[in-house]
Amino acid sequence: MARYTGPKGRRDRRAGVMLSNMRKNPLERKPYPPGEHGRGRQRQTEYGVRLLEKQKARWYYGVSERQFRGAYDKATRMQGVSGENLLRLMELRMDNVVFRMGFATSRPQARQIVVHGHFLLNGRKHDIPSAILKPGDVITVREKSRQLEPIVNAVENVVAVPPWLEADHDNFTGRVLHTPGRDEIDTPVEEQLIIEFYSR
């Protein structure tokens, strides 16, 4: 199965950090990995540490191994630091941008409403959540979709929009201002370990 469909709390405990947007933090009640030997002494190999870091990034953005490996291959061909390029590519995905702008309460929800065709990209209907956006791209909620309960709830409860994005929630539109820098990406991973995992 390509996409994880199990308990989010169990996955967060395996990662050791909150990757989902659950209301309760499962690490507060059980601050150790899941499973029979979760409380035992953990002996992590270098390979295991790098593998877990890669999995954390995959789980955080909700992408398959094939998609993530494709992004890594593209990141290594770009100019600059490969690890930062990888995170930028993940941040600029259509589903992530919709979530970051506050039009969805989670990345899975953002992916679903994008696939269902509720958004316009630069004025044209767009339903590919993995598309990589560019600075200047404009996302708009379609007129007939602006009363959808998930979108309305998300807009009403939005907390903040990252500085590399601009969102007008009154008019249900947003724009990518610039490519995010590493200091503007709050993904809880060490990207260099991911690069080391794939380049071993």
Image: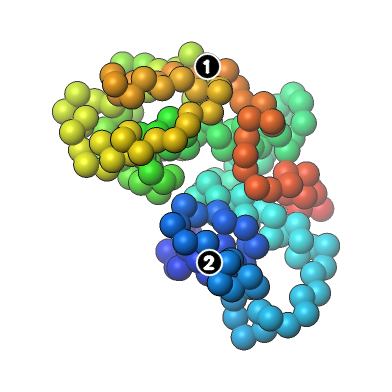
Q: Secondary structure at mark 1?
A: loop
43 horizontally vs 34: left or right: right
* Res. 65 in view: no
Looking at this view, is 161 or 76 the one in front? 161
Residue displayed at 60% across by 80% down? 35
How far across and how far down the image is residue 197, in percent? 76, 53
The image quarter containing residue 50 is bottom right
* Res. 157 in view: yes
Mark 1 crowdedness (10 Å alpha carbons): few <14, some 14-19, many ≥20 = some
The image quarter containing residue 40 is bottom right
Looking at this view, is 29 or 110 the one in front? 29
How far across and how far down the image is residue 106, in percent? 41, 46
Q: Which mark is residue 177?
A: 1
Residue displayed at 57% across by 37% down? 90
Q: Is residue 191 above or below residue 6?
A: above
How far across and how far down the image is residue 162, in percent? 53, 28
167 horizontally vs 155: left or right: right
95 horizontally vs 196: left or right: left
32 horizontally vs 152: left or right: right
Looking at this view, is 141 or 50 the one in front? 141
Name the residue furthest top.
136
Q: Secondary structure at mark 2?
A: helix
How far across and how far down the image is residue 193, in percent? 77, 50
Q: Which scheme is used to colour this image of the protein?
A: rainbow
Q: Is residue 177 above or below residue 100?
A: above
